[in-house]
Image: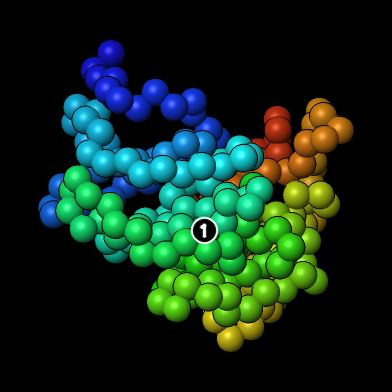
């Protein structure tokens, strides 16, 4: 063991850490059901933590945009945004319920955050005005990532993979196909929940024991 955090004993959630840089120093930003926090990657020192109470599991990785940290959860928790004013200080910018996301994650592009919000559908939220820009219920719930200015969506029920524009003017799906094969080992209450990954021009999609790779290069 190299280090262990001191003063952060919250139960872990289904979230990964994100990397932020404040004042020329890197820190790992994470979330539990009780706190949003930043720790030093060299020694695990807790640099800051703020309350983040959620009545449901938290499956979202914090989104770091410049000096801002954005996090969301469902169950009435909503979205919150903090400014990293110093390596050891996070100041709240806003808190509202535009984005109620569980699961699937959210992604940021050009000053906006995109994700599926319970009750609203696929939603675009402005980081500047903090309000909803648009919401669309015509495409089913799922996970997403952003690559090259496009939303890559994966629906949780049918396993539909779709490409949509990451734009604040409207929600438009430009192409789609159905993921195959799909897992037969999923429990009855489970869905396709793994977030799509784009790396080196390839799209990776996982459904339980199946991992699929698609070439996205021209």
| Residue appearing at x 26%, y 56% in the figure | 84
Q: Viewed as shown, does residue 54 lie left or right of 49?
A: right
Quarter residue 170 falls in: bottom right
Number of numbered callouts drawn: 1
Q: Viewed as shown, does residue 216 lie left or right of 1?
A: right
Quarter residue 118 falls in: bottom right
Q: Is residue 28 above or below residue 202?
A: above
Query: Does residue 213 appear anywhere in the picture?
Result: no
| Residue 61: x %, y % from top left | 47, 46
> Is disc 1 placed on a helix, strand or loop?
strand
Q: Is residue 103 above or below residue 85?
A: above
Quarter residue 91 falls in: bottom left
| Residue 38: x %, y % from top left | 30, 41
| Residue appearing at x 79%, y 47% in the figure | 180
| Residue appearing at x 41%, y 43% in the figure | 51
Q: Is residue 66 above or below residue 169?
A: above
Q: Residue furthest top?
A: 1
- Crowding at dot 1, Cα within 10 Å, few <14 / some 14-19 / many 20+, comes out as some
**Residue nearest the viewer, comparing 20 with 130:** 130
Identify the residue under disc 1. 79
**Residue nearest the viewer, comparing 53 with 186:** 53
Query: Does residue 122 appear anywhere in the picture?
Result: yes
């Amino acid at each position: 063991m190299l280090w262990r955090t001191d003063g952060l004993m919250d139960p872990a959630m289904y979230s990964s850490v994100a990397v932020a840089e404040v004042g020329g120093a890197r820190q790992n930003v994470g979330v539990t059901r009780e706190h949003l926090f930043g720790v030093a990657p060299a020694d695990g020192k807790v640099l800051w933590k703020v309350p983040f109470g959620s009545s449901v599991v938290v499956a979202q990785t914090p989104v770091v945009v410049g000096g801002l940290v954005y996090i969301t959860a469902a169950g009435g928790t909503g979205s919150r945004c903090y400014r990293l004013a110093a390596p050891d200080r996070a100041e709240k910018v806003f808190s509202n319920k535009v984005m109620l996301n569980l699961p699937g994650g959210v992604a940021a592009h050009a000053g906006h955050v995109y994700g599926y919000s319970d009750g609203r559908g696929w939603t675009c939220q402005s980081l500047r005005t903090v309000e909803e820009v648009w919401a669309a219920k015509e495409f089913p719930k799922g996970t997403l990532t952003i690559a090259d200015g496009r939303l890559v969506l994966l629906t949780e029920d049918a396993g539909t993979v779709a490409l949509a524009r990451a734009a604040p003017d409207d929600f438009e799906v430009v192409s789609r196909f159905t993921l195959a094969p799909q897992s037969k080992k999923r429990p009855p209450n489970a869905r396709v929940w793994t977030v799509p990954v784009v790396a080196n021009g390839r799209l990776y999609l996982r459904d339980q024991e199946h991992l699929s790779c698609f070439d996205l290069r021209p």
